[in-house]
Image (cartoon, rainbow, N blue to C red):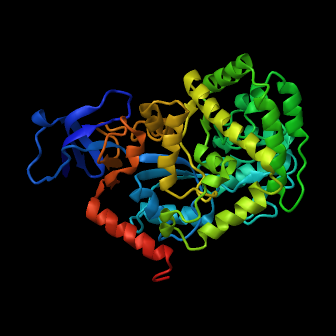
């Protein structure tokens, strides 16, 4: 048993901080939380004094891509306080990593893993390298087959993508209901967003394609989304430019009544939104990508070159000064949309899209929380988007997401108050994962191992 004494507990329920608390952990589970003066420490327990420190639930990144060196990414999540992730493009490799983590062979997060990405033809990933080729469907029969294959491979949910056609999308959701497997991912360009909210899709990712539904000209702009046709070299770049144009028109015809209706529907249908503002920040404001970022020492040496290439070949291709000015405005409007969703009661999930330019596993989630607070969320609400809200979304609220007896001992211990400054979530003193305490010295040693692996030592 471990006894964390004299901690200030931020339990993520929304309650005020609890000063001078003792948290008892036994067999990977929180056994007790109470005032230190009235919570006896059992004989033989290891006592860890957290005077002046803050204890809160481990964080969840609800939008990750973790393909890469097994010595780097799984450990980096945990060492940065991310004790659970939702993997948005599942592969045999990520399922193998999850199994090894669960068996205690690797340090890593709790994983919820999608099946293979399901897209329409031509797929946005048809001429780009991904972790594996996407599943491309054309018609209801192929869509239903893809859902069955996702279920059979043991995925936790179906990942749907932007270019799936309307008939395939509707068949996919129908088959997923029949098989009782959740669906998450992008909105389809070919189905009005308001309909998709009612379809049963559990979450939508990124602030792409949201605004046509919130426009005073929603019918015309949804039709414009459906007219998008992509060209190779690359399909993604072609799509991105066209979506940007529709976004600009939609954002400039924003309708308060229309947006209130959309957000109300999301709340009524318990639909979550994962905005990934940190990803949008770098795509809208590419000057913020630092190819000399010191955190790159924890990433393979080709990462900076990959970021530069993806920016140039996918996101910045044919972007002129006028387009760049529009993107700066759009980023501020994305932040405003996130604040409006929070005000309306939409369930927000903190996610980062690591491996997008500028976004590093583990580190990105702390940036996402800062961006959410910058958008207008309170520090507590931002913390909840990475703790209790993903736990509720994943059906795990009875065993994770808060610091309460009976919950798993996935904990983050900070040197400063995150409610005073959300940036303090990155001031990590220690991490607890599955009850294992990783103190300052061990954490530094493990980060050094990640750095050596990133540099290729021992490969």
Q: Residue at x 48, y 55 (%)?
A: 362
In the rendered picture of this protein, how many numbered marks are placed on residues? 0
Q: Is residue 290 left or right of residue 366?
A: right
Q: Is residue 435 left or right of residue 399?
A: left
Expressed as whole percent of the image width and height from the top left, the position of residue 182 reads 63, 41
Nearer the observer, 332 or 135 = 332
Q: Residue furthest toward the top?
A: 257
Q: Residue at x 52, y 62 (%)?
A: 293
Q: Is residue 383 left or right of residue 159?
A: left
Q: Is residue 333 left or right of residue 75?
A: right
Q: Residue furthest toward the left?
A: 43
Q: Residue at x 82, y 32 (%)?
A: 249
Q: Residue furthest toward the bottom?
A: 458
Q: Residue at x 63, y 62 (%)?
A: 91
Q: Is residue 437 visible?
A: yes
Expressed as whole percent of the image width and height from the top left, the position of residue 371 reads 53, 40
Q: Is residue 33 above or below residue 457?
A: above
Q: Residue furthest toward the front?
A: 321
Expressed as whole percent of the image width and height from the top left, the position of residue 302 reads 61, 73
Expressed as whole percent of the image width and height from the top left, the position of residue 172 reads 76, 43
Q: Is residue 189 visible?
A: no
């Amino acid at each position: 048993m471990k006894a964390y004494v004299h901690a200030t507990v931020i339990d993520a329920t929304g309650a005020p901080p609890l000063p001078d608390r003792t948290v008892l952990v036994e067999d990977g589970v929180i056994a007790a939380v109470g005032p230190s003066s009235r919570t006896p420490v059992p004989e033989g327990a290891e006592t860890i004094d957290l005077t002046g420190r803050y204890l809160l639930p481990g964080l969840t990144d609800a939008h990750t891509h973790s393909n890469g060196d097994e010595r780097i990414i799984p450990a980096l999540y945990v060492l940065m306080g991310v004790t659970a992730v939702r993997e948005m493009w599942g592969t045999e490799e990520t399922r193998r990593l999850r199994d090894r983590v669960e068996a205690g062979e690797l340090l890593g997060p709790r994983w919820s893993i999608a099946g293979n990405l399901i897209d329409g033809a031509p797929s946005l990933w048809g001429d780009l390298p991904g972790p594996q080729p996407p599943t491309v469907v054309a018609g209801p029969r192929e869509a239903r087959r893809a859902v069955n294959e996702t279920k059979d491979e043991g995925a936790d949910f179906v990942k749907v993508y932007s270019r799936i056609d309307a008939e395939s999308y509707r068949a996919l959701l129908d088959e997923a209901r029949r098989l009782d497997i959740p669906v998450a991912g992008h909105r389809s360009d070919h189905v009005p967003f308001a309909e998709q909210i009612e379809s049963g899709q559990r979450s939508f990712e990124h602030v792409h394609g949201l605004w046509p539904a919130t426009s005073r000209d929603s019918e015309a702009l949804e039709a414009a989304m459906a007219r998008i046709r992509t060209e190779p070299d690359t399909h993604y770049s072609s799509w991105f430019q066209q979506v940007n144009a529709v976004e600009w028109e939609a954002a400039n015809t924003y309708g308060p009544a229309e947006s209130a209706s959309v957000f109300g529907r999301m709340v009524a249908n318990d639909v979550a939104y994962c905005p990934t503002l940190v990803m949008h920040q770098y795509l809208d404001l590419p000057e913020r990508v630092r190819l000399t970022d010191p955190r790159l020492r924890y990433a393979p040496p080709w990462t900076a070159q990959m970021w530069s290439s993806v920016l140039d070949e996918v996101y910045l291709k044919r972007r002129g000064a006028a387009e760049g000015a529009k993107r700066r405005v759009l980023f501020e409007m994305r932040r405003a949309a996130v604040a409006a969703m929070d005000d309306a009661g939409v369930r927000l999930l903190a996610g980062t899209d690591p491996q997008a330019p500028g976004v590093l596993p583990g580190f990105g989630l702390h940036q996402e929380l800062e961006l959410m607070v910058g958008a207008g969320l309170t520090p507590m609400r931002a913390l909840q988007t990475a703790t209790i809200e993903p736990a509720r979304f994943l059906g795990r609220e009875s065993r994770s997401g808060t610091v309460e007896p009976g919950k798993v001992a996935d904990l983050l211990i900070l040197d400063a108050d995150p409610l005073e400054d959300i940036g303090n979530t990155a001031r990590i003193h220690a991490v607890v994962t599955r009850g294992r305490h990783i103190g300052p010295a061990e954490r530094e040693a493990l980060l050094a191992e990640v750095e050596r692996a990133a540099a290729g030592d021992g490969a």
